[in-house]
Amino acid sequence: MTAAGDWRPLADRMRPATTQEVVGQRHLLGPGKPLSGLLNADPLHSAVLWGPPGTGKTTLARLVARNAEADFIALSAVMSGVKDIRQAVDNAKKTKTNSGRLTVLFLDEVHRFNKAQQDAFLPWVEDGTLIFIGATTENPSFELNNALLSRARVYVLKSLSVEDLKALLRRALELKERGLGGAVECSEDQLECLAVAADGDARRALNLLELAAGLAASEREAIINETVVSDVIAGGTRRFDRAGDVFYDQISALHKSVRGSDPDASLYWFARMLDGGCDPLYIARRMVRMASEDIGNADPRALRITLDAWETYDRLGSPEGELALAQALVFMACAAKSNAVYKAYGAASSDARELGSREVPERLRNAPTKLAKSLGHGAGYRYAHNEPGRFAAGENYFPDDMEARIYYEPAAAGLEIQIGEKLAVLREANRKAQEK
């Protein structure tokens, strides 16, 4: 099923040889699109390709070098160090001196390099010795030096659609030199299954097809049928990086779905994270945060319900305990929303940091001893329970040299409607008492 003597994996053989063979990335490729200039060396410039695995980062870097008739040096940040970078720089200098050709240095997983390692090749990017192209699955803003980012354009690659992957798999089935050359048959339904299982990753799609073709070839009819596909994709999980952008993007989507009162989207992202292997206890902890940040006193039950769901999961484990987490998520999504306490706490924290160590007024100080009382601690304190309505109207509980603040403004939602009404009455009573 391969060309004579070519035992490379199908994914490597099928790597696009021209820009026209690239599937997906329509937002970057084609006339007038952002990446077209770089691919046509018009102008040739350093770049960072940011996107999920299997979206064509290495392929595009190779095409840039090929179209620019430049030398291509590929390094992996996992396997390489400063010594390898220096060797690449020396090679680039010699190439430029001997033939005038430029060198494209492709650094895969560039986010694995620390800041010092990134600095090692920065001068050679700056003076034009190297055209740097980095590939990363992580957010460059967090992982790359500002100096390096300022000298390289960032292009964001997207996961391939199911239709893109199906087109790629059809081509691999048909091509004789680089593909399977019609040695096996595969229906559209089974191509669809393989494409969906690949989860936007072209390399994964071709690897699955190669495995399926190998299994099918051992049968008399050489057909990739439902049984073959099921065997190949069994146990596959969706893309989920427990320490990377995909992780934080998905928990962000879950949090925003709850905040946005969408129980259905909340359940979807919850299921996505579990499907990808996320620890349910991590989600449980984040749910407690959501209950305070986005619901607060609009429905105080949310905090207790999330804690109960956490405890339930702790006792039952997976998968039984996951239903309790799902129940709590749905409750929170449907609950009244308020971030009033979240905002009030933030404002109070800011004052505590910025206004210095103001003295506690003597009337509010603790007076557990005779000495403390003799110093005036507690003198003049108005015991609220002895006041009309159990409220000491006009009393100031802030430091005497600090203007009173209003941090907490209840939202017009849920229980906070009643809290807001009560506070309005009390604050008005304070105002009138202080005017006397």
Image: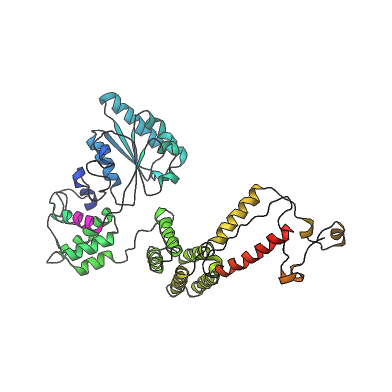
Magenta-highlighted stretch: main secondary structure?
Answer: helix
Front-most of residues 363 and 434: 434
Indicate the position of residue 352 as horizontal and vertical percent values.
65, 51
User: Furthest residue to the top?
Assistant: 97
Q: Which residues are magenta?
A: 161-169
Q: Nearer the viewer, residue 151 or 343?
A: 343
Residue 162 included in the magenta stretch of the image: yes
The verdict on residue 396 being magenta is no
Residue 9 seen in render: no
- 237 horizontally vs 179: left or right: right
Residue 309 in percent (x, y) is at 50, 72
Q: Looking at the image, which residue is at 25% across and 67% down?
A: 231
Relative height, residue 72 to residue 425 (above, below): above
| Camera sees residue 238 | yes
Residue at 43% of width from left, 56% of height from top? 248
The picture places residue 369, in percent across and down from the top left corner, at 85, 62
